[in-house]
Image (cartoon, rainbow, N blue to C red):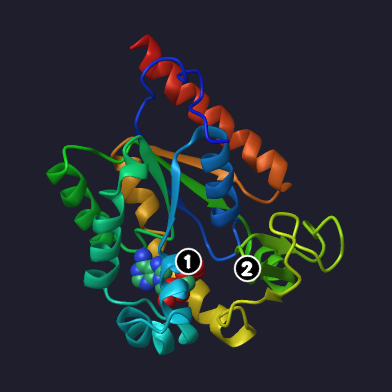
């Protein structure tokens, strides 16, 4: 069930969030947690693009090879996808962006887009973790082909081996870009292009950095505290 922390009987507080972090930091897992716990909708550009590739849509045909190499698709395309998606009704109380923005120009475009819609980015959370830990995580991760639920062979296996906890499916897949060679390019792209976003958002006073190396539950606990504090500040303010 989707609920809004503390505000279920009153008007929910709109919060628009961004999760930043290197590949494997747990952005998708934690964005799902925020959606389930607080009701803010997870918007993952990577997931949207992978769905377009699977559906063999025009966008999917344009982006398949780029994504398989671990390169970034064009700013125009991701900005258009996000702009259209945040206008949908389920985002009216806020959302959590996972995988976007990925560069300073994308962040600037997002600010313009939000201000045109009379909104802003309220909270940015950086999930920080060392590369060795991330490589180990990526090596073990897989998802259900039916419902896209994420798992990890060691840290988060399905309760019953070979059966998805969420939809009962038996078919699992790994991301085409989760291989050693592509991973190196994805880390390089993260440190060169995405990491400077922490400075960008820190200057705006909205950045929180969380240690993403402990367990999934412990990282979720840290995120919950940040969101609860932000929500109680709104309630008091
Ligand atoms: P992710 O699931 O966030 O790791 O994204 C997977 C792939 O989708 C990336 O390696 C890029 O090729 C593409 N992608 C996702 N988000 C963006 C973005 N904001 N800008 C450019 N490319 C993106």
**Does any portion of residue 14 appear in the rendered image?**
yes
Residue 20 sits above or below residue 94 on the image: below
Q: Which residue is drawn at 80% across and 59% down?
A: 158
Labels in figure, total? 2
- Tell me the quarter of the picture where residue 236 sits: top left
**Does any portion of residue 17 appear in the rendered image?**
no
Nearer the camera: disc 1 or disc 2 = 2
Q: Position of residue 10 (x, y in %)?
A: 40, 15
Q: Where is residue 191 in the image (x, y as percent from the top left)?
A: 45, 67
Q: Where is residue 70 in the image (x, y as percent from the top left)?
A: 47, 81
Residue 176 sits above or below residue 120 on the image: below
Q: Name the residue under label 1.
A: 47
Secondary structure under badge 2?
loop
- Tell me the quarter of the picture where residue 156 sits: bottom right
**Which residue is farthest left?**
116
Can you tell me which quadrant of the image ligand 1 is in? Answer: bottom left
Q: Residue at x 39, y 50 (%)?
A: 198
Name the foreground residue: 170 vs 121: 170
Secondary structure under badge 1?
helix
**Which quarter of the rendering shows the C terminus?**
top left
Name the foreground residue: 62 vs 183: 62
Indicate left or right for 158 with 62 as reference: right
Name the foreground residue: 75 vs 205: 75
Q: Position of residue 32 (x, y in %)?
A: 56, 48
Indicate left or right for 111 with 100 as reference: left
Q: Mark 2 points at which residue?
A: 146
Q: Earlier in the sequence, mark 1 or mark 2?
A: 1
């Amino acid at each position: 069930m989707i609920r809004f922390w503390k505000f279920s009987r009153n008007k929910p507080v709109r919060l628009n969030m961004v999760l930043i972090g290197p590949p494997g930091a747990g952005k998708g897992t934690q964005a799902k947690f925020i959606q389930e716990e607080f009701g803010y909708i997870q918007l993952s550009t990577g997931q949207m693009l992978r769905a377009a590739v699977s559906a063999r849509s025009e966008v999917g045909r344009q982006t398949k090879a780029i994504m398989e190499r671990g390169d970034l698709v064009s700013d125009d395309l991701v900005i258009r996808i996000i702009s259209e998606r945040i206008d949908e009704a389920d985002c009216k109380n806020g959302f959590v962006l996972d995988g976007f923005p990925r560069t300073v120009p994308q962040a600037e475009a997002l600010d313009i887009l939000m201000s045109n819609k009379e909104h802003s980015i309220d909270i940015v959370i950086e999930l920080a973790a060392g590369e060795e830990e991330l490589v180990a995580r990526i090596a073990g991760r897989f998802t259900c082909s039916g419902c896209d639920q994420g798992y990890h062979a060691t840290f988060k296996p399905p309760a019953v081996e070979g059966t998805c906890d969420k939809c009962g499916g038996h078919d699992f897949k790994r991301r085409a870009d989760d291989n050693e060679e592509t991973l190196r390019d994805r880390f390089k792209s993260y440190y060169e292009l995405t990491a400077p976003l922490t400075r960008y958002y820190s200057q705006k006073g909205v950045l929180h950095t969380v240690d993403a190396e402990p367990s999934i539950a412990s990282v979720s606990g840290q995120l919950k505290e940040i969101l609860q504090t932000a929500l109680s500040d709104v309630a008091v303010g």
